[in-house]
Image: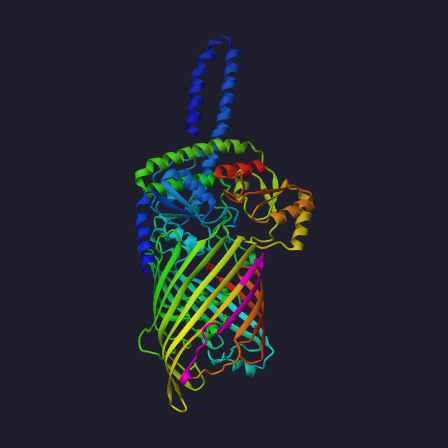
Amino acid sequence: MRDKFLFIVVLLLFSLSPGICLGDDIENRLKGLEATLKAQGEMIKEQQEVIKALKDQLETARQKSGPTTRDTASSEKEPTHDNQSAKESADDKGWKLTGLFGSSNLANPNISLTLNTFGYHSNLKQSVLSGRGIPGYTNSGLTNTKGFNLDSAELGFFAPVDPYFNLYATIPISEEGVELEEAYFVTTSLPYGLQVKGGKFKSGFGRLNSQHKHVWDFVDLPLPYRAFMEGEGITEKGVQLTWLPALPVYALFGIEALQGENATLFGSDANIGPHAFTAFVKMSLDLDADSTILFGPSVITGKTKTDTVAENTVFQGSSTLFDWEMTYKWKPSKQKSLTIQGEYLYRTQKGNLTDNNTELTSRLSRGQDGLYVQAVYQLGLWRLGARFDALNLLATEYSPAGEQPDFGSLPWRASAALDYSPTEFSKIRLQYNYDKSGRDHAANNEIFLQLILAIGAHSAHPF
Amino acid sequence: MMRFMIAALMLLLSAAPAAAQIKVVATLPFIGSLAQEIGGDRIEVVTLVKPGQDAHYAEARPSMILAARKADILMYNGLDLEIGYLPRIMESSGNPNIQPGAAGNFDCSRFVSVIEKQAGVDRSMGDVHPMGNPHYVFSPKNIASVASGMSRALSEADPANAGYYKHNFKQFRQKLAKKQKEWRKKTLRGKTFVAYHKYFEYLASEYGFRIIAYIEPKPGISPSAGHISALLDLMKRRKPSAVLATYSSGAKEAEYVGQAAGIRTILLPNDVGAAATAGDWFSLMDTVMNSL
């Protein structure tokens, strides 16, 4: 630019000099000269601005490309408006870290730590609580202690392994020790909407089963989950295949082959080799811009050997658990939402029940069921939830040795929860349970005050 | 079941011939609008986040996963803005075209001169974006280079129509140059504003005005009474031109603060489609520039 300017000035001088020599109407010429100079001055100003803009651009481009050097040879320059095109060439082919998984780095996976701690109180004695099962369903008691409870500090790891696999691990650390709750890979590059998950993972069975504790809407799982799966549901070693076809509506089809170690459903020594199999379909529709429904059936079946059917017995046979899930979510804005969710579960068990004392074996064939329905209303940072869960609704037959024992009244429970999340990384929750699942006249009035805090990598929220 | 499977297969087969158009899935409305501007009728655009929804807090609905499953190109804002849902959508889609590093993974922020990059941040500072301010939607300069990137990405995905995309981009650029002349006439240089969230930093740096304070004490943190009263004191002293917020984020708070300080409140659409007058990116910018 400057060269050009000098050239023009020199040219001007040359072109002017003869005029001066002539001496004739110098005034006119001077005026002309003045005008030209003025124009030149303006031009300089303009050009200086352009230079400045270019310099700025160069600077930003330099900052942008930073220390990483990239192959810029193949850049096809596309002139943009405002004289800016310099910075684009650097990014033509090279892949910049996207930041999708937070501040990406290769040396470390994304790590998070989630603290789940709660205070607990009940009107029942501690000894009663720890012996309080659900007669006819499970004889293992409640695990909460009156007073302070530390559920866990849960470590989460995730990162892409390579262009073909993502790897996840969930490691809750509690006072009892370290547990490898989940460790699994997910494929990302299979064709036709297929995806394989393998390792130890939460089964895709049902709705709540695949959710982590810290995203539950209540402190505890509903009764049917406790009755049929115990603990935190079906978390098993195995492999899962899902297929999401490119249909006009969302329909996810999945099958799993699992080791079958869930103590309540299968018992840990039911069979050698994988012996539990699941299949599920999840369908979803957007009813309008703000509301969505998600629904579908699931089934898990496998060989069973457990001692949880009744005191001093061993059951050997097979169990099949069916589930129908339904979720409706209305979310007009981030300030407001309503989620109504429910699952109906039905279990059949067929096999032999052996009494440990008498060593007498009788044929057991029973069907049992349960459901829960919950609604959570969110307003700003607050959420108010209500839940009703019950067992023994439609299927109640239980016939060891042909007789129907009386387990007492219908097991049911009602809960209310109020939670407050100052940010998406912290949550404090107050929950009350009116629990009649003990099937006697005593109600268990439980109260929880829970605190969930998360640090580290930002994990994506489930729907 | 069998009948359903057959129906499903038939649907799959019938869907195949329609695949002539490039399927673009855009996370945010302005990205979808820009893609449409460049891709015209040769592409089919699905936008995941509703206009007027806060882009930080969208949720991965199954329909979004399905859309991503069918996408040839996924275009997103980047800079961690969609971190709460996009990683899940991408993984659950199982679509190899759009995974990080694949040709169909188009991070718009790659073409942006990012401002406000922050080192040494933690979450006690609120919902900070260490990679820089992600709200470059109101930045004509950056949007121009995003659009140029889109035209190249589309040309690569669909070389047969490369000329068409280039032509559309040239038209876009010309229109932008014309519009920018209009927008530059607006005298914003030296003006000061108070804003709810860090939505307007790119606009401020391009048009020479300043945001002197925020209603949010920290990004993503709701204001406390103490913060508001300190803010009102500051506003009395500094007398900013107006209080800025978007319809979907901080409108109520901004109106309250504006009224209390006796200063005009300007509510702006945060994205394309968030106001009746903001049908595409140009009209979004027109709406914003006319309101300021």
Question: Is A386 covered by the magenta stretch?
Answer: yes
On the image, the x and y values in percent for residue B149 come to 39, 42
Picture quadrant where residue A385 is located: bottom right
Q: Nearer the viewer, residue A92 or B138?
A: B138
Magenta part of the protein: which range? A375-402
For the N terminus of chain A, the image quarter is top left
Judged left or right of residue B184, residue B152 is left
On the image, the x and y values in percent for residue A390 come to 51, 72
Residue A309, placed above or below residue B198: below
On the image, the x and y values in percent for residue A185 come to 36, 64
Residue A391, placed above or below residue A215: below
Query: Residue, x 49% and y 73% (percent of image)?
Result: A391
The answer to whether residue A100 of the structure is visible from this angle is no
On the image, the x and y values in percent for residue A179 come to 43, 73
Question: Is A284 covered by the magenta stretch?
Answer: no
Picture quadrant where residue A230 is located: bottom left
The answer to whether residue A15 of the structure is visible from this angle is yes
Residue B7, placed above or below residue A216: above
Q: Nearer the viewer, residue A65 or A164?
A: A164
Q: Nearer the viewer, residue A192 or B128?
A: A192
Determine the residue located farthest toward the top in the rendered image. A24
Judged left or right of residue A144, residue A323 is left
